[in-house]
Image (cartoon, grey):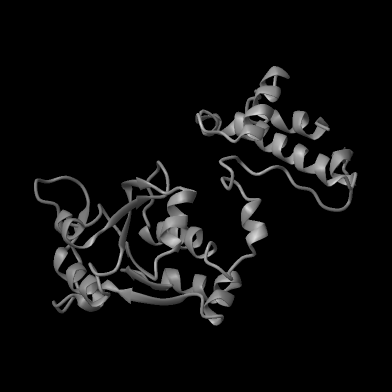
């Protein structure tokens, strides 16, 4: 996948592509990237990229002229082009999976009060929000989007790891443990030390359901839940499995 990210502050993005898993993905050829400074496309001597909002109000808005030229040079609208914004469609795991199948993406990082609407209408294919909150930096939101996408590409992370993650089955991920088995008076649940893989799998699924009940119950309101999940959900509710956040730990570690 070729990622082209347009920003007023590309230096914020640079280090991310030069470290850890992303560095290896770039070296292996799974990811290509280009960081574009939008100011390079401003024509005045001060490289001005913002101006006052028509109609009044606080803050400045990113001007259409340099954005239009930068996006055109990046290949938009021929390439799927994303603008990260709090007013966009919510990013989900399934949405990230859809985007990960693209051969290339152009990502626009907003600043100030955002960008001129005419750019959104003429160049942007997807307006994406990473959550119901506002950031001062579109670069941070863009990196969240990139991280959610590239790790799903074949060869970047093992398929087995992806299958066990939160949202892979519509549930939050189960709790996990490592050595030592006893730490600060807290012992790892016996079932995960048993070596019985069938029991461990059942415990993990039920622990995922309990955690989802506590933190994201709306994920369990779907009519098309898998039969094994629906069965364990009913069992967890019958056992009083609904817990307020912060109290689920004791219940799930005692589960066998």
Q: Is residue 185 left or right of residue 226?
A: right
Q: Residue at x 50, y 73 (%)?
A: 17
Percent across and percent down for residue 26 are 52, 78
For residue 223, above or below residue 205:
above
User: Residue at the spot x=40%, y=41% of the render?
Assistant: 132
Q: Where, by quadrant of the figure, is residue 23 drawn?
A: bottom right
Residue 12 appears at what percent x and percent y?
A: 43, 69
Rendered view: 25 above or below 205 = below
The spot of residue 38 in percent (x, y) is 26, 72
Q: Quadrant of residue 230?
A: top right
Quarter of the rendering occupied by the C terminus: top right
Q: Position of residue 191 (x, y in %)?
A: 86, 39
Q: In this orientation, which residue lies closer to the viewer: 236 or 247?
A: 236
Picture quarter containing residue 79?
bottom left
Residue 62 lies left or right of residue 26; in this view the side is: left
Residue at the (59%, 76%) spot, across then down: 24
What residue occupies the far left of the structure in this picture?
Answer: 55
Count of numbered marks: 0
Vertical relation: 113 (above or below) 243:
below
Q: Image quadrant for the N terminus? A: bottom left
């Amino acid at each position: 996948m070729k990622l082209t990210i347009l920003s007023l502050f590309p230096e914020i993005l640079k280090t991310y592509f030069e470290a850890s898993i992303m560095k290896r993905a770039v070296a292996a050829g799974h990811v290509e990237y280009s960081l574009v400074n939008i100011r390079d496309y401003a024509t005045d001597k001060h490289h001005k990229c913002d101006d006052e909002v028509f109609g009044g109000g606080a803050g400045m808005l990113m001007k259409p002229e340099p954005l239009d030229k930068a996006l055109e040079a990046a290949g938009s609208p021929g390439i799927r082009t994303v603008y990260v914004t709090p007013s966009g469609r919510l990013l989900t795991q399934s949405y990230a999976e859809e985007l990960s199948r693209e051969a290339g993406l152009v990502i626009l990082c907003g600043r100030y009060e955002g960008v001129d609407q005419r750019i959104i209408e003429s160049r942007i294919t997807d307006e994406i929000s990473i959550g119901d909150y506002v950031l001062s930096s579109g670069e941070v939101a863009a990196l969240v989007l990139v991280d959610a996408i590239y790790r799903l590409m074949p060869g970047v992370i093992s398929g087995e790891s992806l299958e066990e993650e939160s949202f892979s089955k519509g549930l939050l991920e189960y709790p996990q443990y490592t050595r030592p088995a006893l730490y600060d008076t807290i012992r790892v649940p016996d079932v995960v030390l048993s070596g019985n893989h069938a029991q461990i799998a059942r415990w993990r699924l039920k622990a995922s359901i309990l955690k989802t009940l506590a933190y994201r119950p709306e994920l369990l309101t779907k009519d098309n839940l898998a039969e094994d999940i629906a069965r364990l959900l009913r069992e967890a509710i019958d056992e009083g499995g609904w817990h307020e956040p912060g109290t689920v730990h004791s219940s799930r570690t005692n589960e066998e």
